[in-house]
Amino acid sequence: MRILAISGSLRANSTNTALMRAAIALGPNSMECHIYNGLADLPHFSPELDDDKSPAPVLSLREQLRAADGVLICTPEYAFGIPGSLKNALDWTVSSGEFWSKPVAVISASSLATGGNKAHAALLLTLTALGATVSENARLMVGAVNRKLYPDGRILDFKTKQELIRLMEGLAETIKAGETVEPDL
């Protein structure tokens, strides 16, 4: 199973990226995960650029999504939503349909106890518009994330580790089943 992992944070020492890497490490052996590193390179979405001659970073994103059996997205919450750079990347796939019926696992993480619940809801809403498949077992909100990871990204909290394992197994099950599950909003 090829998984494309996308962090919604552009920070070099992002807690969300560290959490995403931890989830990858805890995933089933059948998963081959690739981290998408082009979020900062995408131009602002514009319908005038959204055609067969879209900018190279957009074409690369779309190609990587098409090649993936599933997607893992880990995002922080900014101003009660997902970061603009992540939303921009998702907007580039509206007309081309790479997320249609694609199994996706969603993690939102915040230093607040809420676990980025508003970003989580916003991301699920966008993924619904894109036609993505997000099963109940492939959703996770991690509150107080800065107290659950060591600085090097290793998981400090046993419960969080178990939840990440469940999430990655849920993504694998969704891919294997080929099921289509609409997110609850």
Image: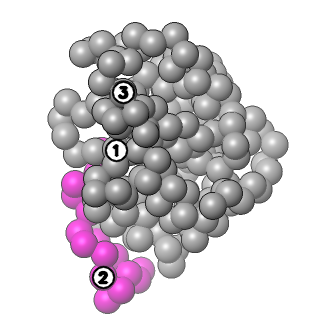
| Between discs 3 and 1, the one toward the N terminus | 1
Q: Tag 2's secondary structure? A: loop
- The quadrant of the rendering that contains the C terminus is bottom right
**For numbered disc 3, what is the local secondary structure?**
helix
Point out the stretch of residues depicted in magenta.
37-55
Mark 2 to mark 1 CA distance (whole Å): 24 Å
Q: Which secondary structure lies at badge 1?
A: loop
User: The N terminus appears in which quarter of the rendering?
Assistant: top right
Q: Compare residues 9 and 64 and report the one nearer the observer.
A: 9
Mark 3 packing: few (<14 Cα in 10 Å), some, or many (20+)? many
- The colour mode here is one colour
Q: Which residue is mark 2?
A: 46
Disc 2 vs disc 1: which is toward the camera?
Answer: 1
The numbered disc on residue 145 is 3
Q: Position of residue 113 (x, y in %)?
A: 40, 33
- Give the vertical position of 106 relative to 91 (above or below): above
The front one of 116 and 11 is 116
The residue at the point 54 percent across, 64 percent down is 125
Circle nearer the N terminus (2, 3)? 2
Residue 99 lies in magenta, yes or no?
A: no
Rendered view: 61 above or below 69: below
Q: Residue placed at 28% from the left, 53% from the top? A: 78
Residue with the mark numbered 1 = 76
Q: Residue at x 41, y 70 (%)?
A: 91
Q: Quadrant of residue 100?
A: bottom right
